[in-house]
Amino acid sequence: MIFRSLLAALALMFVMSTATADQRWQRVEAVTQALDNRVPELEGLSLELPLVAEDGSSVSLSVSFTGSLEDGEHIEKIRLFAPGNPRPEVADITLGPLASPANIATRIRLSETQQVVALAITNQDRAFLTTRDVRVTVSGCLVGGGDASAMAMANPRLALAGSARPGQPVTVRSLINHPMETGLRPDGQADDSIEQQLVESLTATLNDEPVLTARFFTGTSANPYLQFQLTPEEEGELKLAWQDQKGEQMEASQAIKF
Amino acid sequence: MKTRFALTFALLLPALPALADDQANAAQTALLAASCANCHGTDGKLAGVIPAIANRPATALENQLMEFKHSDSTRATVMPRIAKGYSDDELKALAQYFSRIGSAQQR
Amino acid sequence: MTKSNFKNQGLNSSRRDLLKLMGAASALPLLGACSSLGGPASKDLSARVVVVGGGFGGATAAKYLKRNAPDLDVTLVEPNKVFYTCPFSNLVLAGMRTMDSISHNYNELRELGVRVVHTTAQDVDPVSRTVSLGDGSSIRYEKLLLSPGIDIRWNAIEGYDQAAAEQAPHAWKAGDQTRLLRRQIEAMDDGGVFVLTAPANPFRCPPGPYERASLVAHYLSQHKPRSKVLILDAKDNFSKQGLFMQGWKDVHGDRIEWVGLSGDGKVVRVDAGKREVETEFGTIHKASVLNVVPPQKAGFIADRAGVTNESGWVPVDPVTFESTQVKDIYVVGDATIAAPMPKSGFAANAQGKVAAAAIIAALEGQRPLEPSWANTCYSLINPEYGISVAAVYRIQEGLIHESSGGVSPSDANATFRKLEADYASGWYSAITQDTWGTRR
């Protein structure tokens, strides 16, 4: 009897804490704007992040869709937000039908302990949303060495993890070296900031057909990393093109062979 | 779900009250002092490359700790970084604590 | 199903979830479970406390339990009669120390009155409060303290399993793995490459891989001067990075090369037979000696006890180091989620003392004392060149925070570096004396 009321009390508290926990995203303007009056489903999207991040400058994140979709429906957009950062935007990823299943991994910046929000929108205008709490703490043994990297893109990298097969998903990894200056960090001079300089976008095409476009914001880590799934129907050339804020471009390509 | 429970747990943890009686204070100081043993041996009695701190005059210990904490010109290595993590009162209590540990006492 | 059958099969998941609920519930004052806070003190200092794991955390906890409450019935369960420490095992790899000099035993704990049982702990049943032991017996507890250390996440890197570790050692638990890696380093041809792969956070001993690279480079400079060290890292920032890199430049020239995450340093596949690794973007590195420091998780007994969460590590109440998931089980050391405290032997020792005090307070019906912890990690660039990180940790708003701390100055002179190298050995003598009572 006592035991049962104890469980009931706990269940109540659990429901209450679930409700409050999941409402926090509703107060984030960037998220509500992105939703644009759509009411998101809270099941179906899965977001993986460490519970405790010991280096907030680069936190591994992966988001994947595990729910069910209608025939002909696919995830068209994935948007990531870190509302506790000075600017909440992390990345916007637009997926074409070749970039399926929707499964993205990247590395993000978290300036403090917070709830990260992932939003997915389908080509039939359905929205899915999920959140994840991350505690950010700099480990006592971890003191980063501030290095001054060049303000230009360098070393574009592209690789397939495994071999491509027709109609089968293969993991594509990409990375480019760039400091991703937020424009928010003081450069040591009074009231002065280092000018913002970001890798703005990454576009992936297969035989010039669009696969995926990513827009990176201040919440994306230095040396932007993006991993996605490619389901090719035919052989050809996978091409990635990065563009920075100054309009400079760099490319990498990879043959897709069955 | 587990995370939320952990969170709830932390929020509902009662604030630690100030400990009133001397016995509790003694236990509190002993726990504070236990950290020192990692470099100075159990009860601060291991003399080696790193000096023993047990059974030394309280004023000497206190002066040294205060210098670690407040002086920027010290040539010490890790102690200035550690001493800054304690209040002056805590450092005084530690000095008193180690001054009262007899060097002949069993480890 | 008989009770013993049930125990042999371990906890099923729904039972574990229920236990977690009960563990969480017991801390909620509104449910009246914390009656001891206001009620009369119930002194029970002849209670049975079982400690599992005789490393820095467990041996320290057993010692301080018995010192501070001599009437307690304290049992330490540890399979090894001789314990080899990970700290200073890098010196063994470099030929600067013997295995004997990093070995410790349990004689002092026995003299103090701790019952030391040399067997494995196989399972924990939090309902009957029983630990099943490897010798077939079981032992009951009022309070259980686990110091599980780490287990390797086998196959987290493709191709790195137990068999691979016999050819490409991790040497991240000291003992036979340390000996094996030492033999390989000694047998390496001059002009070879020692490849060390370092994992992402969190892992045991954050500065450990970089001290290892330093000391192997020191050995090579003396015995195989044409050889190199290559570190392939799954992260871009690491412990004491600035000091290490400066030290490498000062002492080792270009002998040590470090490739971080954004330089394609993350290893995704190991071929131990060929001593080859492949990185995220498909670069193959061939090693003369391959040392894989793999991803890790809490030691297996933590999982059996139901105290780990989905991260594979153990969430604890920061004030007492009691599990937040199962009541009356305290967990210390590398297995815990105690960040910003690092996974170090020093931290485990400090946590062992806090948990011991919390167990005594709980048995006495007292509130827990206010905890504080310190941590100092020394690393050697070579025998004459030491660097350190030191910090004090306190509770702020219910969480562990660093209240002071920092690393060695970047502009220190050779005398300072030598002093810290000497203090490193002083530290080792002191912490092992404090933990096991052995003199090294």
Image (cartoon, coloured by chain):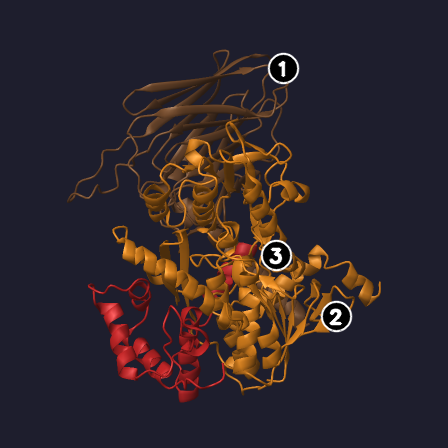
Left/right placement of residue B34 relative to residue C293 reads: left
Marks 1, 2: nearer the viewer: 2
Residues tagged by mark 1 and mark 3 found on one chain of the structure:
no
For the question of whether residue B40 can be seen, the reply is yes
Q: Which chain is brown?
A: A
Confirm whether residue A129 shows in the render. Answer: no
Q: Around disc 1, counting alpha carbons within 10 Å, would you say few (fewer than 14), some (14 to 19), or many (20 or more)?
A: few
Q: Nearer the viewer, residue A142 or B79?
A: B79
Where does label 2 land, which residue?
C138
How many numbered badges does the structure rendering display?
Answer: 3
Q: Position of residue C427 (x, y in %)?
A: 42, 65
Camera-side residue of A18 and B15: B15
Marked residue chain, label 3: C
Type of amino acid under label 2: Ser
Say which element carries label 3.
loop
Chain C's shade in the image?
orange
Residue at label 3? Answer: C299
Residue nearest the viewer, comparing A96 with A228: A228
Q: Residue at x 33, y 41 (%)?
A: C249
Q: Percent from the top left, x then y, of residue C367?
A: 48, 78
The answer for which chain carries disc 2 is C
Chain B shown in which color? red
Rendered image: mark on residue A258: 1
Residue situated furthest front in the rendering: C223
Left or right for C30, reference B33: right
Gap between marks 2 and 3 measured at Cα: 20 Å
How crowded is the residue under tag 2: few (<14 C-alpha within 10 Å), some, or many (20+)? some
Query: Quadrant of the image for the N terminus of chain C?
Result: bottom right
